[in-house]
Image (tube, grey):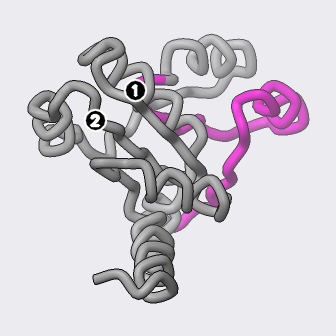
Amino acid sequence: MLIAEDLSTTVNVPVEVVPMEELEKVLSNSNNGTIVTSRYFLQPLEKVAKQHGIRAIAVDLSDFQKELKILKELNAGSCVGIVSISPGLLRAAEVIIHSMRGSELMLMTGISDNNSRLLSLLKASNLIVCDGPSLSVVESTLLNEITSNNMC
C-alpha cells in the first residue's frame, strides 16, 4: 500500500493494490500489468509474474538506516511498537528486527486503523516506528490519550 501511495502521485497510470494472496486470481483475469513490490517480496512475486508473462520490479522507498541504527542501540528488554498501513511491511520489519536482535527486544505491531491495538501498542512501547501514512494517526492517538488522562 505504501508503494501504491507513492506511485499514484508520481506516475500517470492506474495503480491497483492487490494482496499477495489474491494476485494469482487478479492476473488470470488481466492481460497486462507490472507487479511493483518491495525487495523483500520480489523473489516469490517474480515467479507469479513469469507465469502470466508480465514483469515484477522492486522499489525501495527507504533504506531505514536511521531506524536500524536506533534499534541496534536500544537497550535489551525494550518494547518496540511498529505501526503501518501495510501488513507486509509489518511482517518484514518483524523478521528484520528479530534477525538483528533476536529476543532482546519485545515487538508489538499494529495496522494504523486498528484503534484498540494501536492504543495498547502506544502505551507499552519504549520506541514507536511508523510509516508516513500512519504518522498522523499515531500522533492524534497519542495526543488524545495524553489529554484524556491529563498527562503532560
| Residue 28 appears left or right of 20 | right
Residue at figure coordinates x 46%, y 70% from the top left: 9
**Amino acid type, label 1:** Arg
Q: Quadrant of residue 47?
A: top right
Please give the range of residues in magenta.
12-40
Reading the image, the residue beneath label 2 is 78
Q: Is residue 99 above or below residue 37?
A: above
Residue at figure coordinates x 50%, y 51% from the top left: 121
Closer to the eye: label 2 or 1 = 2
Disc on res. 39? 1
Q: Nearer the viewer, residue 110 or 87?
A: 110
Tell me where residue 54 appears, x and y as whole percent: 64, 27
Tell me where residue 78 appears, x and y as whole percent: 28, 35
Q: Residue furthest front?
A: 150
Residue at figure coordinates x 39%, y 29% from the top left: 106
Q: Nearer the viewer, residue 102 or 40?
A: 102
Tell me if label 2 and label 1 are in contact, CB under 8 Å.
no
| Residue 7 appears left or right of 73 | right
Residue at figure coordinates x 68%, y 17% from the top left: 48
